Amino acid sequence: MKHHDHDHAHDATLEELRQALTREFWDERYGGSERVWSGRPNQRLVEQTADLTPGRACDIGCGEGADAIWLAEQGWEVTAMDVSRVALDRTAQHAIEREVDDRVKVGEYDVLAGHPPRKPRHSEGFDLVSAQFMHVPREDFDEVYQRIAAAVAPGGRLLVVGHHPDDVETGARRPHGPGLLFPPEQVLAALGVEGGSSDDWEVEVVDSPVREQETEDGLMRVRDSIVRLRRRQ
Ligand SMILES: C[S@@+](CC[C@H](N)C(=O)[O-])C[C@H]1O[C@@H](n2cnc3c(N)ncnc32)[C@H](O)[C@@H]1O
């Protein structure tokens, strides 16, 4: 097996990776086309929330709002957060079009800003905090995911889904090289979950399945990292 960690042609520096997490970068990316993502909810979100009772959810890095809107349609009260104002405006607009704007709020949140997402008023947190493809540099990963996890209420779930580092080997288009990709175990380690549980978290799902994804280069096999944890009461 080839290892690209140090020799991948597109390996980016830490500064370049952090640049890909700024408002300017994403406002420009979203501003450059009418629609960047498909408008369909992420498959893993749909699968992983099927057995949950709707409550208050937070979607970190919500993009154009497909997941937030889908969750609202299932009965969740959703706060959709993103660093990009263009993304948030689009999410709000799509929520109006789909007539779920009474259940979708948007709010600016920068995962690198150093504070946890704001919890709903008069509550101990969200019943579900979802971060789908919210990739951050390895150097920032533990702190970012500890802050995101801090917004989960006792008894609530943290759902993290991302691209698995295997994708670099299989040739899936990953413009920044391996620097932003993570295996599911990295989330567990960031939250101090050793050997399948911790004082704070019960592990419900740790998986890295393959799915087929439509891309500009045709149908590709991609591997997802999936972690679902429940905060102990
Ligand atoms: C790969 S997209 C995923 C969007 C959506 N979750 C999905 O799965 O379709 C990453 C999202 O994270 C947002 N993002 C990037 N940097 C961020 C940051 N520092 N804080 C919060 N959100 C950020 C981007 O604007 C973008 O919408």
Image: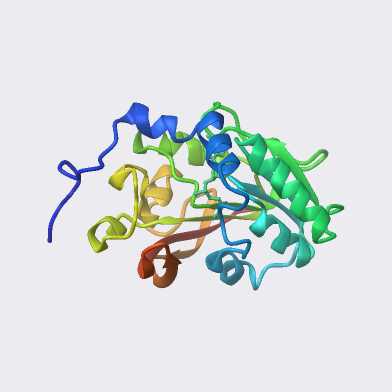
Residue furthest front in the image: 33
Q: Position of residue 220 (x, y in %)?
A: 36, 69
What residue is shown at x 81% (from left), y 38% (from top)?
A: 121
Residue at 57%, 68% (x, y): give it.
48
Q: Nearer the viewer, residue 98 or 79?
A: 98
Can residue 214 be seen here?
A: yes
What colouring method underlies this structural image? rainbow
Q: In which quadrant of the rendered view does residue 110 lie?
A: top right
Can you give x and y, in whole percent of width and height, for residue 172 in the image? 32, 60
Q: Quadrant of residue 229?
A: bottom right
Front-most of 9 and 158?
Answer: 9
Q: Position of residue 79 (x, y in %)?
A: 73, 46
Q: Residue at x 54, y 48 (%)?
A: 200
Q: Quadrant of residue 2?
A: bottom left
Q: Residue 89 at what x, y percent from top left?
A: 72, 42
* Residue 31, above or below 230: above
Image position of 109 (left or right of 227) = right
Question: Which image quarter is the N terminus in?
Answer: bottom left
Q: Whereabouts is ligand 1, in terms of quadrant? A: top right
Q: Residue at x 38, y 52 (%)?
A: 194
Relative placement, left or right, of 222 versus 134 is left
- Judge whether residue 125 can be spotted in this image: no
Q: Nearer the viewer, residue 221 or 58?
A: 221
Q: Is residue 68 left or right of residue 104?
A: left
Nearest the eye: 212 or 195: 212
Q: Is residue 177 above or below residue 70?
A: above
